[in-house]
Image (cartoon, rainbow, N blue to C red):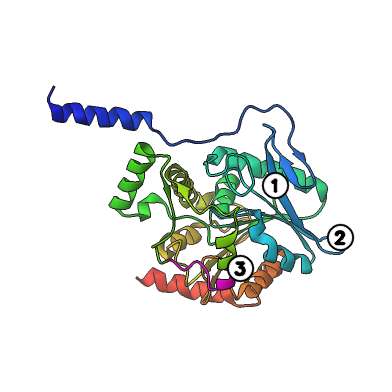
Amino acid sequence: MTIRRAAVLMIGLSLAACTPTVKLAGPPVTSPALADDAIVTADEMRLPLRAWTPSSEPWAVVIALHGFNDYGFAFDEPGKALAEHGIAVYAYDQRGFGAAPNRGYWAGETTMSADLSAAVRLIGARHPGKPLYLLGESMGGAVVMVTMARPDAPPVAGIILSAPAVWGRDSMGFLQRGALWFTSHAMPWLTLTGRGLNIMPSDNIEMLRRLSADPLIIKETRVDAIHGLCDLMDHAAEVGPLLHVPTLALYGDKDEVVPAEPTFRVFKALPKDPVPPVRAFYPNGYHMLLRDLQAKVVLDDIASWIRNRQAPLPSEADRHALDRLAEAAKD
């Protein structure tokens, strides 16, 4: 065997040994339960839970899922705003994020979907007879999508996708895909930061500064967690046609995180039953629509849609979406 062939073999064996780490749920040992400050999963993991409730009995309930490297407190201001509309909002730290177990490690799509389904059952039981909606931001939107595309999807009144993470590998360049695969298999423990990317996730600079100082925000990301996120985005980009549930899909024209092309493709593929989806595009919106400077506009639209899914949105962002999608179809 030549030295070159031996080196290739050694590299191959090393890559096989260094596969991405996924912290899946353990075997069930109890029934999921709802505590005051946490969702306790079947494998006895405590997922920190926050709630924003109106002063009187809520007329609707929202379970909100945060984005990648974020955590449930992301919905503090949105939760307060929706509570003023009479809507109760719950948000938990997903596994691997915030103060949840296995911080920094990817939990896997199946585990994340199972946790969401358990949350729907538990929180729905706390508010019997109230319509329950799912709100997913970025990665959270992708988790909502793949969960609701399952044959055993939990019963909800509708879903709200805020800039969902649908940037699948087929929308990435060859070098991006290759570099991600190599590093996630050769060096899954390697951590990366967002420094130097020159991406503007929001025009709310004060909010971004608070996030940079928040110790529960993950600043250095394991490459194998990014690999897991890409797997999730791949699947989310495919399941749009399977989302037979009332859907409000939101996107900002200034989003620099999730590109417009794959987002438009997914939004166009949403089915028209049981009711046509409502797509809303915001000319001044960035990726973090719910925390941008114009967040109130978006949150008022969400509350309006929850109350009456057939009514036009107050901001007319749904009309702007029709224009943008028509323009994209000509290109």
**Residue sitting at 42 percent across and 60 percent down?**
195
Q: Using the image, tell me which numbered label, if any, was put on residue 291.
A: 3
In front: label 1 or label 3: 1
Residue projecting furthest to the top: 1
Q: What stretch of residues is rendered in magenta? A: 199-208
Percent from the top left, x then y, of residue 60? 77, 59
Question: In this picture, is 245 found above or below 198?
Answer: above
Q: Residue at x 30, y 46 (%)?
A: 178
Q: CA distance from mark 2 to mark 3?
A: 26 Å
Whether residue 279 is visible: no
Q: Label 3: how many residues lie within 10 Å, few (<14), some (14-19) or many (20+)?
A: many
Q: Which residue is mark 2?
A: 57
Pick the front one: 149 or 258: 258
Label 1's element? strand
SS type, badge 2: loop
Whole-percent x, y for residue 287 in the image: 52, 65
Q: Position of residue 248 (x, y in %)?
A: 61, 62
Element on which disc 3 rests: loop
Q: Is residue 154 left or right of residue 103?
A: right
Label 1: which residue? 48
Kind of residue at disc 1: Pro
Work out whether residue 299 or residue 236 is closer to the camera in this orientation and state it.
299
